[in-house]
Amino acid sequence: MYLRLQDSRDRELDEKVNALERAGHPVVTIGLRDLFDVGAEFFRWEFATAVAGAVLGVNPFDQPNVQESKDNTKRLLAEFKAKGRLPEGEPIFSEGPIRLYGNAASAAAIQGARTLGDALRAHLLRIRPHDYVASTAYLQATPVHAESLAAIRSHIRDRFRVATTLGYGPRFLHSTGQLHKGGGDNGVFLQFTADDPVDLPIPGEPYSFGVMKAAQALGDLESLQKRGRRALRIHITGGIEAGLRRVLEAVRETN
């Protein structure tokens, strides 16, 4: 779907869309008179979602798996209050500042991996035809982080020839997060977490904002694993920028 300003002179973008159409992909172009027409597009797609939901037999005004993640987070924070720590479990692979976490199926998939590149290759080889790969980052959305995460996403797309997405937690939980858990089993997931270099307490609570964010990430991962989704959590224990660079190097090693 191509939203294009009618007086746009972006020939490079036009050519990219034309190339998709020539390759046989279904493409619809909607011409906008000016930027204010974006408001009408919001309504168009909200209405289209409701209609598609009716045809598919899906309630477009409900988000049960979003609520499930919230409930998981509350339970994990209650456990932190009682025990002073979150139940992260043991990593299934470690290399320097990078630790990988996953369920028994993920552990079996990367068994025998000697390097981070080996482990990520084994996980990504679980991709099947028509799957997508979703990267969910519970990290601060800085330009440097965004650049590294985009490079990771792009390389996976090009290497494995699949659709890829990138979302920041916890905000993606209210959009694509419902699809991840309530949709079909055609997603492979990479969740990024890290030790926060700076953290702040929450007034009136025994946990910090960092702990709350970590509980949201763990709650989401728990929901994915409950449904047998192919999910791997990549946790960075040192500097986040250096850790992301190492993950990017490892993803490039999957060639």
Image (spheres, rainbow, N blue to C red):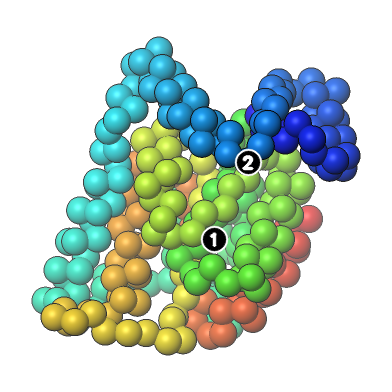
Disc number placed over residue 111 in the picture, else none:
1
Q: Position of residue 186 (x, y in %)?
A: 51, 35
Q: How many marks?
A: 2
Q: Earlier in the sequence, mark 2 or mark 1?
A: 2
Q: What is the quadrant of residue 210 in the picture?
A: bottom left
Q: Is residue 223 left or right of residue 143?
A: left
Residue drawn at x 42%, y 44% is 175
Residue type of the residue flagged with mark 1: Gln
Residue that protrudes farthest toward the top in the picture: 55
Q: Is residue 112 above or below residue 129?
A: below
Q: What is the quadrant of residue 203 in the picture?
A: bottom left
Q: Is residue 86 visible?
A: yes
Q: Are marks 2 and 1 in contact (CB under 8 Å)?
A: no
Q: Position of residue 73 (x, y in %)?
A: 24, 60
167 or 94, which lies in front?
167
Disc number placed over residue 35 in the picture, else none:
2
The quarter in which the C terminus is drawn is bottom right
Q: Is residue 14 left or right of residue 34?
A: right
Q: Is residue 213 above or below residue 71?
A: below
